Structures are given as structure tokens and as C-alpha cells.
Image: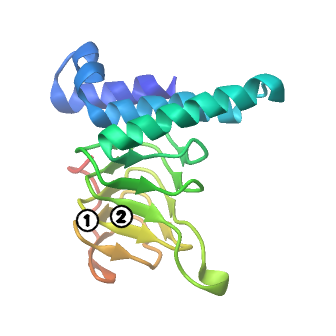
Amino acid sequence: MLFKSDILKYKKYSGKPALILIITTQGLWAICVYRISNFIYKSNLPKLIKKPLLLISILFQKWIEIITGISIPYSASIGKSFYIGHFGGIIINAKSVIGDNCNISQGVTIGVSGRGDKRGIPIIKNNVYIGANAVVAGKIEIGNNCVVAANSLVINSIEDNSTVIGVPAKIINKNSSIGYI
């Protein structure tokens, strides 16, 4: 189960028991509601059952969004071992694709941007760390093992094993996300 991989990652970082984390960690609440809602969304349940369950899950998502400041729509695609480092201000577009073992901090926006053929939503690959208040937007791809520094605006694709910083973000080195994830 994907949620189990999320809990294991939180346990690894905090050293706290799973029950304590589930009770006290807002990022984990948001991920839990997302995982359940996404499971319903992807299921092959009959529409007569699926639609009411999705409606209920949307209500829970909105409630979580209000109390945590974390918006993760059920239609986003997020891999295993997802970690939200801090409370609030996190917006993830409904069509976002985020790979396995990614970490995001508070204030991160992953969204739509651009014009014409360049308009779209980012694809974020595996083992990516996105720092506080960063914005990743547009029809771009963030490669494996990348680091997006705090307060950066990423509007261009980033190759694997890169660290980016700035507005707009530029590659500053080829250090990977090892040590951040």
C-alpha cells in the first residue's frame, strides 16, 4: 500500500511511532486523504458507487485543505514515499505527476503555466526535493535526484542530478538530492 510507504518515510525522519505521526502530522493527514481519494478515483467501481464515494472524498479533501493548508486533488499522480515537510501553503495541480520518494516543503506550488504549446503541468520524477516557497510551473520535467532550492521559480526543464536556485531557476551544480531525501 502506498500510504504505508509514506508512513515509513515519516517514521524514518522523525523516529516516532506510526500512531503518533498519524495523530499529529498534518502532511500525513493530507497524504492519507489523497491516497484514499485517489484509490477511489482510479478504481473500477460502478459509477453508481464511485460518484458518491468521490463526492465524500472531495468533502474530506476540502476539510483537510482548510485545516492544513495543503491541497492535493485526488486526480494528481503521486508515487510512493511522499513526504510533506511542514504545515501549509502547498498547492498541487490536479494533473500533476510526482514520482517516488519526493519531498516538498511548506509554501510549494506545483501548477499550470505557460502559453500555447508551452502551457501545461510539470512532471516531477523520482527522488526530488523541493524547498520552501518554491514554484514549479509549466510544461516542464524535473529530472531524477534534483534539488529545487527554497524560493525558486522553475519554468524550464531540469536534467537529472541537478540543483537549481533563483528566479527563474538556474542549475548551480550537479549535486544530487542525496542528503535531502
Picture coordinates of residue 115 (x, y %)?
Answer: 60, 85
Instruction: Identify the amino acid type marked 2.
Output: Asn
Q: Which residue is mark 1?
A: 175
SS at mark 1 in the image:
loop
Question: Could you tell me which residue is drawn at 64 percent across and 33 percent down?
Answer: 55
Mark 1, other Cα within 10 Å: few <14 / some 14–19 / many ≥20: some
Q: Is residue 169 left or right of residue 157?
A: left
Kindly identify which numbered label has been placed on residue 22: none
In this rendering, the answer to whether 19 lies above or below 153 is: above
Q: Report x, y in % for residue 78.
A: 51, 44
Disc nearer the start of the sequence (2/1):
2
Q: Is residue 70 above or below residue 156?
A: above
Taking the spot 61% from the left edge, 45% from the top edge, the residue there is 75
Relative to 89, 144 lies left or right: right
Give the residue drawn at x 37%, y 57%. 145
Dots 2 and 1: beta carbons under 8 Å? yes
- Quadrant of the rendered image containing residue 47: top right
**Residue 148 in sight in this render:** yes
Looking at the image, is 25 positioned above or below residue 75?
Answer: above
Q: 152 or 141, which lies in front? A: 152
How is the model colour-coded? rainbow
Q: Is residue 18 left or right of residue 110?
A: left
Pointer 2: what residue?
161
Q: Residues within 10 Å of mark 2 (few under 14, many from 20)?
A: many
Viewer-proximal residue among 142 and 52: 52
Q: How many marks?
A: 2
From the viewer's perspective, tell me whether residue 174 is left or right of residue 155. Answer: left
In this view of the protein, can residue 81 be seen by the observer? no
Mark 2 lies on a secondary structure that is loop
What residue is shown at x 36% (from left), y 68% (from top)? 135
Where residue 101 appears, as percent x and y from the top left, is: 39, 43
| Amino acid carrying mark 1 in the image | Asn
